[in-house]
């Protein structure tokens, strides 16, 4: 039987909360206050940690910046002690929070001693030394503004670029390995009658003693310098006649320069000593795309008794037919030499597939300034004019 309305007692929940007589209901509220307080304490701790990390990074940056600045000043003092002329503007620090940088305006280096036969003069509008706080063993260099370079008696060359960067090791016992990367370079003499532009330039040099150095190589005089160089979008000086066209699409080379490099005031005497000590230039790889010519090859070069280059190598030529025609039309080759070379190459060439040009592998020799292919003289190189002793 159902209960009349408003006469039945309400059903009490089975698990209804019953406060303990020894713990009043009012004592339950502080639990929520403790949670809010713990949340605030957590945020305070996190903020304190962040502030400590920032403060530690600032202290680390100050220490690293002072160390880099003192290292640069010590480097300039060491160069002056070696006979260099070093001039710089007032340096400035920066780079926080990721790195430490030292910017050096109007840096000028000049040396005319035995380390650089013929002399070296370099001026940079602005040079920035950068060391990452996360990789403190690598020094990055950035050059901005005009760079003036003069070597020996050569004219003053002005170099500007959208980006010119270098990388060098900072550890005293590290291998002397250097890298150079540049984009949109313009190279021209200070007088400005011509200029060369390079879209992309990458270089790598490894200065390391030869592993097979003998007893006569004490002091590291006998050395091997490894190098890698690549360039793209090269525009040759306008106003000059180029048989294969004014643009070189790509150029790359890799090799090893070996031999003694004794200190000498004269560039001619230094070259003679390098030749007499068995110096050689080994090009392990060379590739170039210039107009119709596609070239890959390798060679070994040295200097003869007249200090002129000599050596031998192998080349793989693509598009040699049109290349020889252009060289003959441009006066680089005689017509008879071009005809003889085409006749020899046609006998050993690999026929191209479809419209592809023929490919040929040929040995090359350079002797007495004459480049020859299978005993067929191709062209006469200009004489390498060394300065007086």
Image: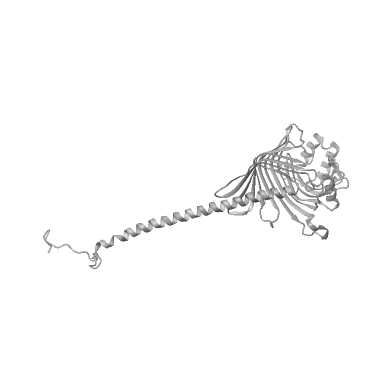
Between residue 129 and residue 335, name the one nearer to us.
129
**Left or right placement of residue 275 versus residue 138 in this view:** right
Left or right: residue 81 compared with residue 30: right
Task: Inspect this view and state whether residue 204 appears.
Answer: no
Image coordinates for residue 178, horizontal then vertical, percent:
69, 50
Give percent across and percent down for residue 161.
Answer: 66, 39
Horizontal and vertical percent position of residue 77 = 70, 49
Snapshot colouring: one colour
Residue 33 visible to the viewer:
yes
Q: Is residue 214 above or below residue 189?
A: below
Left or right: where 197 falls relative to 22: right
Image point 83% across, 58% down: which residue?
216
The x, y position of residue 356, in whole percent, is 72, 43
Front one among 279 and 312: 279
- Taking the view exactly as shown, the residue that stands out farthest to the right is 305
Q: Quadrant of residue 243?
A: top right
Figure quadrant of the C terminus: top right
The answer to whether residue 246 is above or below residue 374 is: above
């Amino acid at each position: 039987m159902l209960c009349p309305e408003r006469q039945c007692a309400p059903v009490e929940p089975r698990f209804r909360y019953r406060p303990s007589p020894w713990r009043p209901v009012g004592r339950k509220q502080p639990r929520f206050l403790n949670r809010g307080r713990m949340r605030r304490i957590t945020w305070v701790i996190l903020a304190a940690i962040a502030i400590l990390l920032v403060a530690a990074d600032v202290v680390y940056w100050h220490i690293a910046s002072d160390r880099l600045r003192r290292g640069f000043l010590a480097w300039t003092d060491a160069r002056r002690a070696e006979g260099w002329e070093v001039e710089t503007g007032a340096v400035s620090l920066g780079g926080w929070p990721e790195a430490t940088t030292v910017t050096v305006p109007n840096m000028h280096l000049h040396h005319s001693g035995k380390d650089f036969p013929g002399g070296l003069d370099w001026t940079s509008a602005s040079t920035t030394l950068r060391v990452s706080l996360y990789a403190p063993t690598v020094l990055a260099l950035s050059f901005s503004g005009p760079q003036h370079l003069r070597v020996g008696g050569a004219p003053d060359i002005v170099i500007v670029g959208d980006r010119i960067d270098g990388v060098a090791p900072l550890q005293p016992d590290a291998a002397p390995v250097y890298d150079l990367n540049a984009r949109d370079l313009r190279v021209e003499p200070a007088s400005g009658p011509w200029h060369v532009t390079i879209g992309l330039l990458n270089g790598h040099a490894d200065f390391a003693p030869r592993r097979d150095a003998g007893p006569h190589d004490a002091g590291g005089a006998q050395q091997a310098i490894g190098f890698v160089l690549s360039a793209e979008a090269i525009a040759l000086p306008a106003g000059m006649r180029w048989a294969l066209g004014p643009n070189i699409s790509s150029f790359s080379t890799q090799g090893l320069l070996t031999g003694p490099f004794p200190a000498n005031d004269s560039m001619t005497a230094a070259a003679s000593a390098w030749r007499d000590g068995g110096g050689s230039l080994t090009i392990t790889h060379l590739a170039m795309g210039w107009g119709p010519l596609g070239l890959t090859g390798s060679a070994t070069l040295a200097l003869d008794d007249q200090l002129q280059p000599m050596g031998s190598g192998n080349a793989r030529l693509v598009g040699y037919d049109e290349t020889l025609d252009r060289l003959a039309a441009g006066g680089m080759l005689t017509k008879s030499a071009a005809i003889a070379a085409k006749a020899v190459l046609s006998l050993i060439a690999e026929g191209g597939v479809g419209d592809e040009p023929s490919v040929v592998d040929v040995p090359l020799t350079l002797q007495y300034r004459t480049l020859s292919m299978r005993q067929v003289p191709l062209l006469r190189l200009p004489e390498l004019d060394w300065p007086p002793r």
